[in-house]
């Protein structure tokens, strides 16, 4: 069965960077793109970007352009999201989420368990 | 302010039918992009409920149904059950601003 297992919670100071990992199993990692979506406390979901796990191409939300970097390691079936210049407003749960294929191209069909990132001085 | 607009909350008694609207624009739902719906139980990750406007993934009860018309979409829950109490989010794609995947603001469903 498809599983996306994320790294543990992080506490960071303002101005620092954080890197969250997402290990995929149960499918061919390079067959699906991987999104990153965040959710601030009590707020809605916010799309950050995605990576084509096959060729490494990325697409980022304009809101995060220049601060976010999404990468992958195909040998480890793992995707990474790094967010820099952290500020308190970046405190949120960060999710990796698999994009569907074919007729489900616009669908996010599986989600990781989430990683809480807390930014505090 | 989310690109897709949902009511903040809806409620209903067990067994009743509730609907959640998701209103977009000509650059997302109205442009023909599919709408998906996700259910998020308290303290858990979202789970896919409806894909491609109206398709239920395997394992999703047929009490849940989706539809789309023009620049809007709807999720209906019939025979409301206590376990349906959760947050629900619609999602689509927006072709403005170089293209973003967009979500609604979320709707809290309360079972009275």
Image (cartoon, coloured by chain):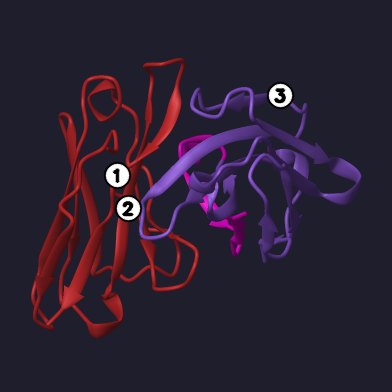
Disc 3 to disc 1, C-alpha distance: 26 Å
Q: Residue at x 67, y 26 (%)?
A: A58
**Circle 2 is placed at which residue position?**
B89
Check disc 1 and report its element: helix, strand or loop: loop
In the displayed structure, B59 sits above or below B74; it is below
Q: Chain of mark 3?
A: A
Q: Residue furthest front?
A: A121
**The quadrant where residue A68 appears:** top right
- B33 or A47, nearer to the observer: A47
Residue B4 within the segment the image draws in magenta: no
Classify residue B21 as left or right of residue B52. left
Disc 1 to disc 2, C-alpha distance: 6 Å
Colour given to chain A in the rendered image: purple
Which quarter of the figure is the C terminus of chain B placed in?
A: bottom left
> How many tags in the picture?
3
Q: Residue at x 49, y 27 (%)?
A: A63
Check disc 3 and report its element: helix, strand or loop: loop
- The reply to whether the C-beta atoms of the residues labelled 1 and 2 are less than 8 Å apart is yes
Q: Residue at x 50, y 64 (%)?
A: B45
Judged by depth in the image, the label closer to the viewer, 3 or 1, is 1
Magenta region: which residues? Answer: A101-121
Q: Position of residue B42 (x, y in %)?
A: 40, 73
Colour given to chain B in the rendered image: red
Q: Chain of mark 1?
A: B
Q: Position of residue A71 (x, y in %)?
A: 76, 35
**Circle 1 is placed at which residue position?**
B104
Q: Residue at x 53, y 52 (%)?
A: A91
**Circle 3 is placed at which residue position?**
A57
Classify residue A17 as left or right of residue B28. right
Q: Position of residue A90 (x, y in %)?
A: 53, 46
């Amino acid at each position: 069965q498809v599983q996306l297992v994320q790294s543990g919670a992080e506490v960071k100071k303002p101005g620092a960077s954080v890197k969250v990992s997402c290990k995929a199993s149960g499918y061919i990692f390079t067959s699906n793109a991987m999104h990153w979506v965040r959710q601030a406390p009590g707020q809605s979901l916010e799309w950050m970007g995605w990576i084509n796990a096959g060729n490494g191409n990325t697409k980022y939300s304009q809101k995060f352009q220049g601060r976010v970097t999404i990468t992958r390691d195909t040998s480890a079936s793992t995707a990474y999201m790094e967010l820099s210049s952290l500020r308190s407003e970046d405190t949120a749960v960060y999710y990796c989420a698999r994009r569907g294929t074919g007729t489900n191209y616009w669908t996010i069909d599986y989600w990781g368990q989430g990683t809480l990132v807390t930014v505090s001085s | 302010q989310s690109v897709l607009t949902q009511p903040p909350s809806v409620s209903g008694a067990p067994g009743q039918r509730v609907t959640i609207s998701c209103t977009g624009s000509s650059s997302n739902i109205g442009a023909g992009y599919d709408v998906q719906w996700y259910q998020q139980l308290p303290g858990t990750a979202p789970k896919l409920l409806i894909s491609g406007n109206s398709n239920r993934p395997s394992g999703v009860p047929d009490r849940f149904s989706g539809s789309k018309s023009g620049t809007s979409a709807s999720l209906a829950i019939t025979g409301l059950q206590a376990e349906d109490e959760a947050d629900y989010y619609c999602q689509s794609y927006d072709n403005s601003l170089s293209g973003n995947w967009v979500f609604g603001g979320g709707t809290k469903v309360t079972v009275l």
